Image: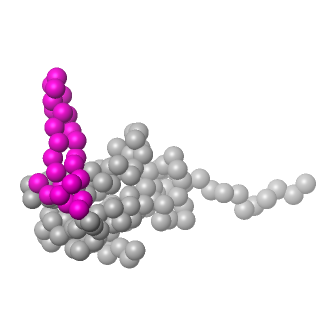
Amino acid sequence: MDTLSYKTKSTRKEDVERKWYIVDADGETVGRICSKIAHVLKGKHKPSYTPHVDCGDHVIVVNAEKIRFTGKKLAQKTYLYHTGFPGGQRSIVAADLMSKKPDQLIEKAVRGMLPKNKLGRKMIKKLFVYAGAEHPHQAQKPETFKF
């Protein structure tokens, strides 16, 4: 019997080549852009994607303060968090979070789209979100990502 020479290759973590991409969030909808960012962080845009290996790329998001919500979400959507003390559940409306820390809106949305395990915690570390147009990652020569 003839052995097949076209077996599926499983990528090892040592073989992963990471690129740096920059994404401009100006005028983009939160959920749509964050799902695309999560896609790149996982590495699903590569033909060598392997589910159990972190083969994603680094993503820099600029202009997070200019991101938009559809409908009444800006006034009605609430984000819950807990202080760690008894009775310490707090909530903040999306409009307040947008005015105080606009970068956290994107980080929270992308974190919810990644796996909830060790692999997801490694993937989220490759996300860099900035409220303005400047970022300190010029040395990595990031490319603009075409969606």
Residue 124 lies within the magenta run: no
Q: Is residue 49 above or below residue 112?
A: below
Can you give x and y, in whole percent of width and height, for residue 75 in the image?
A: 17, 58
Residue at x-position 79% and y-position 59%: 4
Can you give x and y, in whole percent of width and height, for residue 2 in the image?
A: 87, 57
The region drawn magenta spans 72-96
Question: 75 and 100: which one is in front?
Answer: 75
Residue at x-position 39% and y-position 65%: 36
Residue at x-position 16% and y-position 37%: 90
Residue 87 lies within the magenta run: yes
Q: Is residue 41 above or below residue 78?
A: below
Question: 28 and 137: which one is in front?
Answer: 28
Q: Looking at the figure, which quarter contains the C terminus? A: bottom left
Can you give x and y, in whole percent of width and height, for residue 56 in the image?
A: 42, 58
Residue ranking furthest to the right: 1
**Residue 115 visible in the picture:** yes
Question: 80 and 47: which one is in front?
Answer: 80
Can you give x and y, in whole percent of width and height, for residue 83 in the image?
A: 16, 32
Q: Is residue 92 above or below residue 39?
A: above
Quarter of image, res 71: bottom left
Q: Looking at the figure, which quarter contains the N terminus? A: bottom right
Image-based side of 22 in relation to 135, left or right: right
Residue at x-position 20% and y-position 60%: 74
Image-based side of 132 in relation to 9, left or right: left
**Residue 18 visible in the picture:** no
Residue ranking furthest to the top: 86
